Amino acid sequence: MSDPAVQSPAEVAPGLSQGERLIDTFTAPSKTFNDIKRGNRSWWLPFLIMVIFGYIFFAGITQKIGWSQVAQNAIHMNPKAEEQMSQLPKDQADMRMKFTAYAMEGSFAGAPLLILAILALASLVLWGTINFGFGGKATFGSIFAVYMYASLPGLLKTILGTVVLFLGMAPESFNLNNFAPTNLGAFLSPTDTNAALYKLATAIDFTTIWSMILLGMGIAIVAGVKRTSGYIAVFGWWAIIVICSVGWSALMG
């Protein structure tokens, strides 16, 4: 029979509420991730907040820009796509433009499901990486919860994008792929800058880097490994994705 006087800190420490974990993600992230490690893995509150702000941004795009304009901008910012469009008969070009607008609007409207799918896949990859590559003992559920909270800095980008929209951004300059001044690419012209360089500049986004720092810290804590292992796992995969993305842009640009 165990002596209650010698209970471990994990047994006696009170659990945090989701609101406390959300606030601590910005002020004391290790508290949030240690709470997740203790088994408190609820993640619906940060997800709900991200969805709410995402749909506010969606409404701003619909009201201030219009999805037809968003589609036109996307094609204009892609020289090859614009060249192909110019070679089509007018009726086919109009049809393709409408399809592009509907596809972009539909994808954005269904973003919550897309977010869950992407986070689940990424969490699975990180779960395998930190456990089998670095000897961790994390569960998939704890990695997924960490990922959800670590994604919260992305709210700042969404909020900034919404503010820019409602301050009166010129519709023809709106770029759905880079809608807020949180990275180097926001200060470059997507049409006048080398495609690979623009992709690299866009990838160097401070909200993304902030999230990855939190994610590396979090998976290290829940897996019981050194933080450097968490950072290597997260930034290693990020580097691979960026290199592939930049390489593809160079190939297609």
Image (cartoon, rainbow, N blue to C red):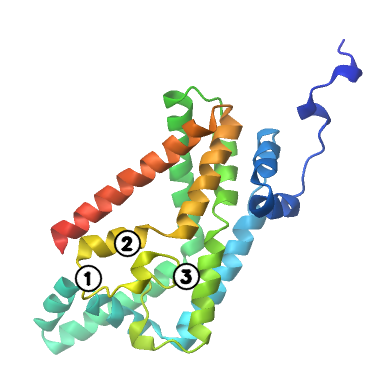
Toward the viewer: 233 or 122?
A: 233
Residue 77 as seen in the image, left or right of residue 183 = left
Q: Residue at x 46, y 83 (%)?
A: 62
Spot occupied by residue 166 in the image (x, y as percentages of width and height): 52, 85
- What amino acid is at disc 1? Thr
Spot occupied by residue 179 in the image (x, y as percentages of width and height): 42, 73
Name the element at disc 2.
helix
Asked if the residue at tag 1 contacts the one at tag 2, i.e. Cβ–Cβ closer than 8 Å, the answer is: yes
Toward the viewer: 24 or 119?
A: 24
- What amino acid is at disc 2? Ala
Spot occupied by residue 20 in the image (x, y as percentages of width and height): 75, 51
Residue 253 as seen in the image, left or right of residue 232 = left
Which quadrant holds the C terminus? bottom left
The first of marks 3 and 2 along the sequence is 3
- What amino acid is at disc 3? Ala
Q: Quadrant of residue 251?
A: bottom left
115 in relation to 73, above or below: above
Q: CA distance from mark 1 to mark 3?
A: 30 Å
Q: Closer to the observer: label 3 or label 2?
A: 2
Q: Quadrant of residue 26?
A: bottom right
Q: Quadrant of residue 100?
A: bottom left
Q: Residue furthest left?
A: 87
The residue under label 1 is: 193
The residue under label 3 is: 109
